[in-house]
Image (tube, helix red, strand yellow):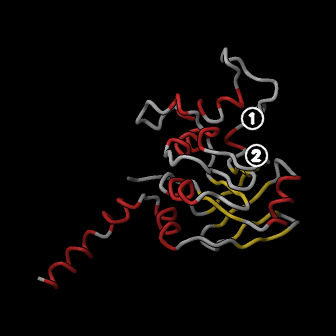
Amino acid sequence: MLLDKFSKLTSRTMVLAQENIDTDQIIPARFLTTTSRNGLGRAAFYDWRYDEAGMARNSDPFAGKEPQAHQILVGGANFGCGSSREHAPWALADFGFRAVVSTKIADIFKSNAIKNSILPIEVSSETHADLIATPGAELTIDLERLEILRPGKWKQSFEMDAFGRRCLLDGVDPLGFLQNCEDEITQFEARRA
């Protein structure tokens, strides 16, 4: 599948400092009845944003923040833990997030995020503490160089597996990556025949 390419992103952060934000908090199970990604952003962190009657909560951490201006989510440690629902990154992407930054991101969530054009980045405790303490900070994430830049403050490198990085840069999921290699696969099979 073709996805949005990810090369470089400059945006403000949205901070959710709570640790162990699981996939049921990201998108409650009652919203998992669809196989469409469209519209799931309205259900992202639904129980944090709305009460039982569907009214906006006063404590809504997203109130007054434009998703287009806050595309980098800084979450507490162990972000994306819990069940392996792909709806979680679908909801985050539809809400407007392009990257998630934490000290630890659950492996299954990380894999699902990459497959849905969201860059998961793990950073040091010191960098994370700085980001948690400064919500709305402007960051530039450069996937080509594997760096995060906070203008006038610091530059932090990060690691990422080569295959996930290639998929994000090319704007494809794993199947799309294989489809892009069709000529090479055909040539390989012909040489083996």
| Position of 60 relative to 134 (above/below) | above
Q: Relative to residue 129, is residue 30 drawn left or right?
A: left
Mark 2 = which residue?
14
Image quarter for residue 26? top right
- Going by the picture, which residue comes out furthest to the top? 53
Q: Where residue 107 sits in the image (x, y, percent)? A: 57, 60
Residue closest to the eye, 20 or 144: 20
Name which residue lies at 71% across and 31% down. Answer: 48
How far, Cα to Cα, is label 1 from label 2? Answer: 8 Å
Residue at the front extreme of this rendering: 82
Reading the image, the residue beneath label 1 is 62
Left or right of 58 in this view: 69: left
Vertical side of 124 occupied by 118: above or below = above
Identify whether 124 is placed above or below 109. Answer: below
**Label 1 packing within 10 angstroms: few (<14), some (14-19), many (20+):** some
Residue for point 88% across, 53% down:
133
Name the residue rendered at 52%, 30% in the picture.
Answer: 31
Q: Residues within 10 Å of mark 2 (few under 14, many from 20)?
A: many
Q: Nearer the viewer, residue 184 or 131?
A: 131
Mark count: 2
When asked about the image quadrant of residue 191, the answer is bottom left
The amino acid type found where label 1 is placed reads: Phe
Left or right: 110 in relation to 45:
left
Mark 1: secondary structure: loop
Residues under numbered marks 1 and 2 in contact, where contact means CB atoms less than 8 Å apart: yes
